[in-house]
């Protein structure tokens, strides 16, 4: 089984995947999100897009469990009760849309992966702010959750839409981190279930995703440690700039082949 997994790529690519995941784990630990964005952007440069999607599944499940564990069960329960509509539609859409990933041609998949990375990163980088009035709260949960879940099912990342949504609700910072952890945690379990069903995660790709748990965990621990020692806003902006460049490269590959 392990040999089948190594047959997916040369040794240099395996080492590069390890390094990309280590960096992604560090980013996740330091700023609380963007692990799937970093992994998809980096891995898709030298791996088949479907293999890249498979690689991210187990690391993001583990990373989101670690993030949720930083809060109490009662706090997590309160977040679920308040945002249950958003969480429900995100999880349902992830499972449904994940089934279509294997049907998308490679060049189209590069565009599907690259365009959301560029657009969502630019929105955050440019500081675009939205505000959702209380009267639109329920409707916005279903609409934004639908879009976030669809993007998550195709690309494995629904973090940026969630961050933008929480900002639009003017959610306090501490509560944002809690809700993000819950949404990402439950959503990642849905992604796991969706790709077990779609076949993207199988006996060949599962061991590779499992091996990448190691750099993901190590990177997160360093990120947690560094989070209080870095200027989070500067680090966030640098990360977003890198993501825009990486996402633009995916778009280029989708357009030119």
Image (cartoon, rainbow, N blue to C red):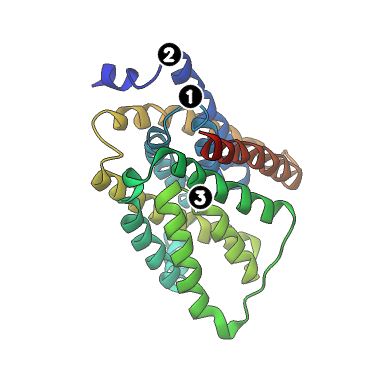
Whole-angstrom CA distance, mark 2 to mark 3, is: 36 Å
Determine crowd level at label 1: few under 14, some 14-19, many 20+ residues with C-alpha closer than 10 A. many
Residue 72, can we see it? no
Q: Quadrant of the N terminus?
A: top left
x, y percentage for residue 125?
A: 72, 51
Left or right of 216? Residue 98 is left
Q: Which residue is mark 1?
A: 18
Compared across the picture, whether 196 is left or right of 86 comes to left
Q: Residue furthest bottom?
A: 135
Residue that appears at 52% across and 75% down: 140
Residue 39 on image: x %, y %: 51, 36
Numbered disc in front, either 1 or 3:
1
Tell me what residue is drawn at x 42 percent, y 29 percent: 212
Please give the residue where the numbered disc 2 appears in the rendered image. 11
Please tell me whether mark 1 or mark 2 is closer to you in this view: 2
Q: Secondary structure at mark 1?
A: helix
Query: Which element type, helix, strand or loop, lies under badge 2?
Result: helix
Q: Which residue is tagged 3?
A: 70
Separation of disc 1 and disc 2 at Cα?
Answer: 11 Å
Residue 158 can be seen in this image? yes
Q: Are marks 1 and 2 in contact (CB under 8 Å)?
A: no
Front: mark 2 or 3: 2
Q: How far is mark 1 from mark 3, CA to CA?
A: 25 Å
Instruction: Tell me if 29 is positioned left or right of 109 in this view.
Output: right
Q: Which mark is residue 171?
A: none
Question: Which comes sooner in the sequence, label 1 or label 2?
Answer: 2
Specify the quadrant of the image occupied by residue 255: top right
Question: Counting other residues with Cα less than 10 Å from the Cα at mark 2, is it few (<14), some (14-19), or many (20 or more)?
Answer: few
Q: Position of residue 167 (x, y in %)?
A: 64, 65
Tell me the SS state at disc 3. loop
Number of marks:
3
């Amino acid at each position: 089984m392990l040999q089948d997994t190594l047959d997916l790529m040369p040794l240099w690519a395996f080492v590069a995947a390890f390094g990309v995941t280590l960096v992604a784990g560090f980013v996740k630990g330091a700023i609380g999100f963007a692990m799937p964005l970093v992994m998809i952007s980096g891995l898709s440069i030298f791996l088949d897009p479907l293999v890249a999607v498979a690689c991210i599944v187990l690391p993001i499940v583990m990373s989101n469990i670690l993030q949720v564990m930083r809060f109490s069960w009662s706090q997590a329960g309160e977040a679920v009760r308040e945002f249950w509509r958003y969480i429900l539609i995100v999880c349902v859409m992830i499972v449904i849309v994940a089934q279509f990933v294997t049907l998308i041609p490679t060049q189209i998949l590069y565009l599907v992966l690259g365009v959301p990375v560029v657009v969502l990163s630019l929105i955050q980088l440019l500081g675009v702010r939205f505000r959702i009035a209380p009267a639109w709260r329920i409707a916005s949960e279903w609409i934004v959750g639908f879009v976030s879940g669809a993007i998550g099912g195709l690309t494995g990342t629904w973090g940026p839409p969630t961050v933008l949504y929480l900002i639009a609700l003017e959610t306090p910072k501490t509560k944002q981190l809690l809700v993000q952890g819950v949404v990402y945690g439950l959503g990642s379990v849905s992604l796991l279930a969706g790709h077990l069903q779609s076949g993207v995660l199988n006996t060949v790709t599962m061991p590779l995703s499992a091996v990448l748990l190691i750099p993901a965990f190590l990177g997160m621990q360093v990120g947690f440690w560094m989070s209080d020692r870095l200027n989070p806003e500067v680090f966030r902006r640098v990360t977003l700039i890198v993501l825009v460049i990486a996402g633009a490269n995916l778009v280029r590959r989708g357009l030119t082949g």
